[in-house]
Image (spheres, helix red, strand yellow):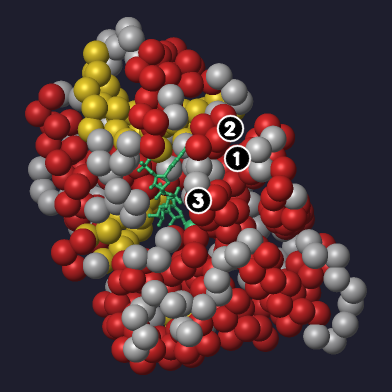
Amino acid sequence: MKFSYVNPTTIHFGRGQISRITSSIPAGRKVLLAYGGGSIKKNGVYDQVSEALTGHEWLEFSGIEPNPTKETLDKAVDIVKREGIDFVLAVGGGSVIDGAKYIVAAALYDGDGWDIMTGAYKFDTAVDLGCVLTIPATGSESNSAAVITKAATQDKLSFMNRAVQPKFAVLDPDVMKTLPERQLVNGIVDAWVHICEQYLTLPHGAMVQDGYAEALLRNLLKLGREYEQRDSDAWREGLMFTANQALNGMIGAGVPQDWATHMIGHELTALYGVDHARSLAIVQPSLLRNQLSKKKAKLEQMGRNVFGLADSPDLAEKTVDAIEAFFHSLDVATQLTEHEGDKTRAIDAVVVQLEKHGMKALGEHRAVTLDESRKILEQAVA
Ligand code: NZQ
Ligand code: ZN
């Protein structure tokens, strides 16, 4: 095990913490408040943010869509450049925060912002970013990753760069009160799969990362089983901090990682508009069954330590069944149905996109080839 680890994002956790924005953005900065389709205007978050920004000069940019597109974000990039913005405050879910990461990077670049996604633009500085999280799910609030879509070509690509990591993130569980059930459940599923992508690989003896990953998985299982308590402060706090810890770099430090479920899932979202988390629930059980022999030891460990299953020759299979049953208990489907019926065409379309995006050898063993992805999809497409 060998790694360097830092998470430089200051977390302001708890009810009423939105007011922390005032002191977290240096005086004299010109701020762009970036948000989505308007949920923050209906639940009082916008008002709290405006109040906190009273002492700063600020402008706003709205309309960042779920699965944010370069086409929309480039309009905000123009504003940042034109108005001399030197701090972007993202208020929203993963889409708004990811979108803001693209904005702060592209704002210091004269070329096409899409070069960030292809790697053609290499950079180590960006405009400063802070955020207020309104949906616990992606972990984007305190990591350096972003996933952006080019609508014109249905490409959904990710990038990671330290320069775009938020300086601070406000995690006020009260903002979750207005989340539609669908988004709340999406948060549980996305965080779950994030942990699995970093944990369900091969035995490596990293006790801290494994132990913490298992604790976070047990939290999510408990939150799902106690879903009827979702209107309590404790339930909201539990989900918000668990989802944050699931993808802030800690459990992934120095260990093998998978991410094949995410890469295949991103193509389902780009082609068929499936919610990010739901794309993962469609892919993960089939992928785990496909990769069972390679993941057997970790699946068995998860079966024992997360689900409390007894030892048996088919413990790994039973663990995958338990994961699938967990998704079903949340009323989340594990089969793709949004592809308008033609199964073969849907699978072909995803495989073509995977190939185009260089996703030809995914997973911790690089064993999820295009052929294996096809087999996984054959299992996963209804
Ligand atoms: O746009 P508004 O009106 O705000 O509505 C949003 C949106 O429609 C709504 N919403 C958010 N907070 C709300 C609320 N509605 C009521 N009350 C609130 N408090 O929820 C809808 C979905 O929001 P979105 O930001 O799209 O959800 P999520 O946080 O799940 O983000 C998904 C995006 O993050 C990417 C995904 O690919 C996807 O594009 N990911 C980013 C990652 C990262 N940066 O590390 C990792 C993830 O694996 C993921 O790929
Ligand atoms: Zn995810």
| Contact? badges 1 and 2 (CB < 8 Å) | yes
- Label whose residue precedes the other's in the sequence (3 or 1): 3
Q: Position of residue 349 (x, y in %)?
A: 30, 83
The residues tagged by marks 3 and 2 sit, at their Cα atoms, a distance apart of 14 Å
Q: Position of residue 247 (x, y in %)?
A: 55, 49
Give percent across and percent down for residue 86: 24, 24
Asked if residue 66 shows in the view, the reply is yes
With 26 as the anchor, is 116 left or right in this view? left
Q: Give the alpha-carbon distance from disc 3 to disc 1, as whole Å.
A: 13 Å
**Circle 1 sits on which residue?**
240
Which quarter of the rendering shows the N terminus?
A: bottom right
**Disc 3 and disc 1 in contact, CB within 8 angstroms:** no
Badge 3 vs badge 2, beta-carbon distance below 8 Å? no
Q: Nearer the viewer, mark 3 or mark 2?
A: 3
Judged left or right of residue 37, residue 373 is right
SS under mark 1? helix
Residue at image x 31%, y 41%?
A: 37
Q: Quadrant of residue 85?
A: top left
Instruction: State the count of labels.
Output: 3
Q: Position of residue 135 (x, y in %)?
A: 49, 42
Q: Amino acid at mark 1?
A: Met
Asked whether mark 3 lies closer than 8 Å to ligand 1, one says yes
- Pointer 3: what residue? 183
Does the Cβ of the disc 1 residue fall within 8 Å of ligand 1? no
**Is 120 placed above or below 106 here?**
below
Q: Secondary structure at mark 3?
A: helix
* Residue plotted at (59% across, 46% down): 243
Amino acid type assigned to the residue bearing label 2 in the image: Pro
| Residue beneath disc 2 | 173
**Amino acid on which disc 3 is placed:** Gln
